[in-house]
Image (cartoon, grey):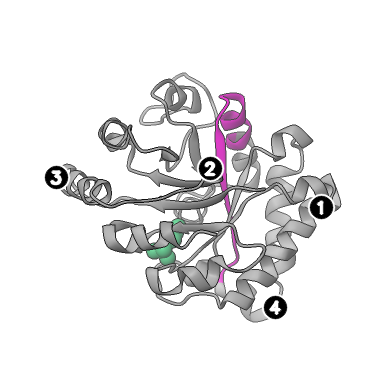
Amino acid sequence: MRKQIAAANWKMNLTLTEAETLLNQLLATEHNLTSNQEAIFAVPAIYIPLATLKLSGKSNFFIAAQNCHPKSNGAYTGEISAPMLASVGVKHIVIGHSERREYFNESDAFLAEKTDAVLAAGSTPIFCCGEPLVIREAGTQNTFVEAQLINSLFHLSVDQITKVVIAYEPIWAIGTGKTATSEQAQEIHAYIRSVFASKYGQAIADQISILYGGSVKASNAIEIFSQPDVDGGLVGGASLVASEFTAIINALK
Ligand code: PGA
């Protein structure tokens, strides 16, 4: 059975005090995750030690990084590598978020290198894909997303691809309050799975967790996560509110 995942993406939010308060609030709640469910927290890198310490006793809770550099070390001022993250216990790394693609010009080829680096460090890439509004309006979202996957992931071996988590995030739904309908999410998630099936076979494709991201909140999580090809969510805004994110965790299948 593939993993069901609620992943928080704090982005560049919260001061140290605010981060600590949010973690304390999350800790004060009961989460009953089954063995195939995970809650992952992609916190700003500077809060990784705090979050690791705070959530250490919670089973199936993991701390993630929001980004990494493809090289393992060297003269890359300001960057953090996948082996460095692994050395502090961070084994999940978000790769290719649309904000990094857009504001930092990260290309499919660069994201392929980053994915390789994460896997080489023995960690899990949470690989983001998704189309902008113009593409959705033109109705060509499937081929757009397919190209992102082919360009960045299709060089991976069967063994490697089963270690990747996909996050489908339509850009028009991120932080806009405009969510894809559960039908739209299911349709493209099924398509993404078929893309992997065509390359790696159905049995492998069925093992890949595909998360939906874009204005997921407590009020729509159950409906979206109930879709057969939606295996949880990558959550921005609502992950900054403990009660919201707790409800999202509890909405996992
Ligand atoms: P949002 O962000 O939940 O605030 O729309 C999702 C994301 O960017 O991962």
Q: Which mark is residue 197?
A: 1
Q: Count up the numbered dots.
A: 4
Left or right for 243, reference 41: left
- Return the disc, 1 or 2, that comes first in the chain's sequence: 2
Which of the two marks, 1 or 2, is nearer to us in this view?
2
Label 4, residues with CA under 10 Å away: few <14, some 14-19, many ≥20 = few
Which of the two marks, 2 or 3, is nearer to us in this view?
2
Residue that badge 3 annotates? 17
33 and 162: which is toward the camera: 33
Which of the two marks, 4 or 1, is nearer to us in this view?
1
Residue in the picture at 73% in, 56% down: 147
Give the residue type at disc 3.
Thr
Q: Which mark is residue 13?
A: none
Give the residue type at disc 2.
Ser
- Return the disc, 4 or 1, that comes first in the chain's sequence: 4
Give the residue type at disc 4.
Gly
Callouts 1 and 2 close, C-beta under 8 Å? no
Place residue 169 in its image quadrant: bottom right
State how far apart marks 2 and 3 are (Cα).
Answer: 32 Å
Callouts 4 and 2 close, C-beta under 8 Å? no
Asked if the beta carbon under badge 3 is closer than 8 A to the nearest atom of ligand 1, the reply is: no
State how far apart marks 4 and 2 are (Cα).
Answer: 38 Å
Residue that badge 2 annotates? 35
Give the residue type at disc 1.
Ala
Which of the two marks, 4 or 2, is nearer to us in this view?
2
Q: Percent from the top left, x then y, of residue 95?
A: 53, 44
The residue range painted magenta reads 114-132
Callouts 2 and 3 close, C-beta under 8 Å? no
Left or right for 121, reference 152: left
